[in-house]
Amino acid sequence: MLAKQYRSFKHDLDQRGIIFSFSGYLSEEILYSLGNALRQKMTLEDANITTVKKVFSVFVEQAQNIIRYSAEKLSGDAGQTIELSSGMVTIGTENDRFFIVCANVVLATDEPRLRQRLELLRSMDRDAIKAYYKEQLREAPEEQSKGATIGLIEIARRASEPIEFDFDPIDDQKFFFCMKVSI
Amino acid sequence: MDNLTIAATERSPAVDFDFAAGRLSLKGESYPEDASAVFGPIFSALETFFAATEGREVTFDFDMAYFNSSSAKALMNMFQMLDQAAASGCRLTVNWFFAADDDTMKEFGEDFSEDLDHVTFNLVAVE
């Protein structure tokens, strides 16, 4: 029964073209290891260097967004302060293209701003995204940002199609956020 | 001033600043958890160096294979600092190395160079 259950689970992932999928508490070390495995896999399959770079870049920005912004966190002190963020990163292929999906819990108070930023990026063409990226690169980061406030623009810049995204309400305070990028 | 040498880590670049020789280099990949922790010491060293470097010839080699968005921002700040140093009299040459088939790194080099008015910028394709 056990093997049958997990064979079916694996089969479902394979059917969806998934190369790998990570769900759970994500750390920078896991990001590094998964990222390396991803690059090796793509290189062995002769993907061109620009495609490998684009997929890797979107993967890193998405994983670092989860680590920084997921509302599902576990923190404590085990000799040193440890904070772990939960989320999901999935990479696969469909119609001869790579796709990267990330998902994590976000606070309802953060949802309008995130939605607005993604909608703005969706409304832009390639040249507008590039110009916006260059403009934001010169700006100081926003106060509440732990990064450079340009991760989403970097993702949009590497994408071959407008970013797909969705919010699924969990309760009054939280949404399950999901974003899909095709390369 | 003392040279600045920092070994590369899995997610941060190798720093090799030979101030006496006027030869500075950053090489590798950069996607650290905290970009300010990686770039902070580099900026401090550069500020001290350029404050006392009027009229000198300095070459800065960038040989980056990949960097994330926060590192891109740090690099942009670094280029602004370099252009200022060149504006105040330092003869600065930047070599931006990229693999010949790597469009992403080539484009970053082009983007950064657009802002430089006083630095001599060479885009160097490596076969």
Image (cartoon, coloured by chain):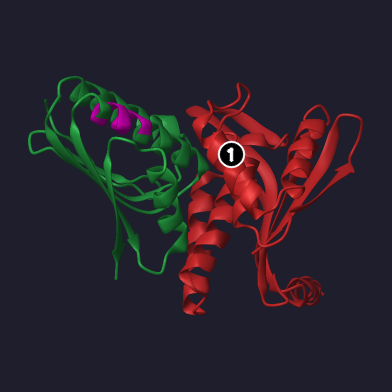
Chain colours: A red, B green
Q: Position of residue B42 (x, y in %)?
A: 29, 31
Q: Is residue B106 above or below residue A145?
A: below
Q: Could you say whether the residue bearing mark 1 is in a helix, strand or loop?
A: loop
Q: Classify residue A84 as left or right of residue B60.
A: right
The span picked out in magenta is B80-86
Q: Position of residue A30 (x, y in %)?
A: 53, 51
A38 or A162: which is nearer to us? Answer: A162
Q: Quadrant of the C terminus of chain A?
A: bottom right
B115 or A49: which is nearer to us? Answer: B115
Within-10-Å neighbours for mark 1: few <14, some 14–19, many 20+: many
Q: In which image quadrant can residue B58 be found?
A: top left
Residue drawn at (15%, 24%) of the image? B54
Q: Position of residue A131 (x, y in %)?
A: 58, 44
Residue located beneath label 1 in the image: A150
**Number of callouts:** 1
Q: Position of residue A174 (x, y in %)?
A: 84, 34
Q: Classify residue A120 as left or right of residue B59.
A: right
The main secondary structure of the magenta stretch is helix
Q: Quadrant of the N terminus of chain A?
A: bottom right
Q: Classify residue A84 as left or right of residue B106.
A: right
- Queried whether the magenta region covers residue A36, the answer comes back as no
Q: In which image quadrant can residue B92 be found?
A: top left
Q: Residue furthest front?
A: B117
Chain ID at mark 1: A
Q: Classify residue B82 as left or right of residue B111.
A: left
Residue drawn at (82%, 43%) of the image? A176
Residue drawn at (8%, 39%) of the image? B21
